[in-house]
Amino acid sequence: MKQFAKPFLVSAALWAATPLPVHAEMDVARLKAAIETSVEADYPKLDALYKDIHAHPEIAFQEVNTAAKLAAEMRALGFEVTEKVGQTGLVAIYRNGDGPTIMVRTELDALPMEEKTGLAYASHDKTTWNGRETFVAHSCGHDIHMASWVGTAKTLVGLKDQWHGTLMFIAQPAEEMTSGAKAMLDDGLFTRFPKPDFAFGLHDGAGAYGTVSYRVGIGSSTADALVIKFHGRGGHGAAPQRTIDPVMMAARFIVDVQSVISREKDPTEFGVISIGAIHGGTAVNIIPDDVLVLGTIRTFKPEVRTKMLAGIERTANAVAAMSDAPPPEIKITEAAKAVMNDPGVVATAEKVLKAAFGDKSRTSPPVTASEDFSEFVNAGVPSMFFNIGVYEPERVAAARNGTGAQLPDNHSPLFAPVPKPTIETGVKAMTLVVLSAFDQHARGK
Ligand SMILES: [Zn+2]
Ligand SMILES: [Zn+2]
């Protein structure tokens, strides 16, 4: 992978000639133009980086080559890079005088699935994961985030006469397992390195490219993993009276647990339970001893979560009791907390995003997916996590009004962002929100 040998001559020169007076309001129009000039000039390199990472994805905690590529880019920009933070994560620091430390996070990991986009730069790579061979694909778009992250770093270095403080760019492993953020924190992310004053992250999705969406407060859901083992007593399928049938229990549970959603939860509050896997039995005529049911529970609010977990446990115990079976083993593990966006950080960023993107920048409902970016927020860093779109606006409009095909979401084997406008929007939006946070801090508001 080629590195950026000559950082950002175009807009650095442009800005050196016309420095802004100290404590002036941010001139968003001029900054935006400078950022656009910079990204346009750098885009061929960002495109090559994106397509290289896309074609050679790596799965959670295996992101060795991906991290090495990013480390090389950041070193070439003058960042001080520490590798292997939280196994495969990296931390890149750039000091530029007195001021706040601002963290920008990307993920490194891809998914254990086969890409079916047919793109020239599609992944055909395989790896071994959990003892099995699997295809690997960047079907969540973390490669877009990485290209935007490098582009943002480069743009901010080029604009370094416009801000003072420290950039802390981190590349996090294993977001899809919601364990990489914690791995970095446990490895001293906020003790070996400065604890940031603010943090930003972004995620792409099946909206229109060129759009930015964000919100104050809850940005994504709390995720709990559900594992239930129903214990019965196996026997012949022709003599069920001499067995206790765990398949029946699992079937009842899967249907009845949805009444926790429809009858117990407040219908105006978000909460979902989806069963993703059932494991039990071997043959048509054998009633097995036990059946394993795996699912995910998503909520926004703690009180809704508490109520749902109680209902789910009660339903599991009740279906076992109905069959005169022993109580099931129920394990519910919190995988990620909801991301809470800081009102002050969002308010500052919003002004700048509105000025730069107009009505293509808008508030949005929280996403029902989950994000371990919440680990950084919960470690006490006021943050903003926002979303950008990846598809042609016309195709998105046609899909929404029913005249065009549904567009593939993240985690679809067909997820295929349009690279240039998506990465450019990522760089532009991220650079502007970071500058807005530096600016706000400098003016002491
Ligand atoms: Zn994902
Ligand atoms: Zn993702």
Image (tube, rainbow, N blue to C red):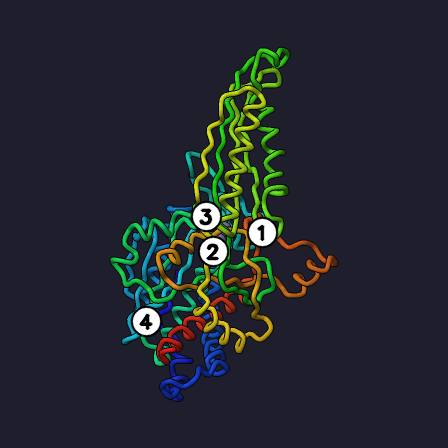
Q: Which residue is mark 4?
A: 100
The amino acid type, in three-letter code, at marker 3 is Glu
Q: How packed is label 1: few (under 14 Cα within 10 Å), some, or many (20 or more)?
A: few
SS at mark 4? loop
Looking at marks 1 and 4 on the same chain, the residue that comes earlier in the sequence is marked by 4
Which of labels 1 and 4 is toward the front?
A: 1
Relative depth, front residue between 378 and 206: 378
SS at mark 3? loop
Q: Which residue is mark 3?
A: 176
In the rendered image, residue 420, in percent from the top left (x then y), is placed at: 53, 66
Label 3 lies in ligand 1 vicinity (Cβ under 8 Å): yes
The span from disc 2 to disc 4 (Cα, nearest Å) is: 27 Å
Q: Which residue is mark 1?
A: 269
**In-image side of 263 versus 47 (left or right):** right
| Image position of 249 with respect to 377: above or below | above
- Is residue 340 in view? yes
Question: What residue lies at 41% left-to-right and 71% top-to-bottom?
Answer: 434
Which of labels 3 and 2 is toward the front?
A: 3
* Labels 3 and 4 touching (C-beta < 8 A): no
Which of labels 2 and 4 is toward the front?
A: 4
The amino acid type, in three-letter code, at marker 1 is Glu
The amino acid type, in three-letter code, at marker 2 is His
Residue that protrudes farthest toward the left in the picture: 192
| Image position of 285 with respect to 275: above or below | above
Q: Which residue is mark 2?
A: 142
Q: Quadrant of residue 209?
A: bottom right
In the rendered image, residue 163, in percent from the top left (x then y), is placed at: 35, 77
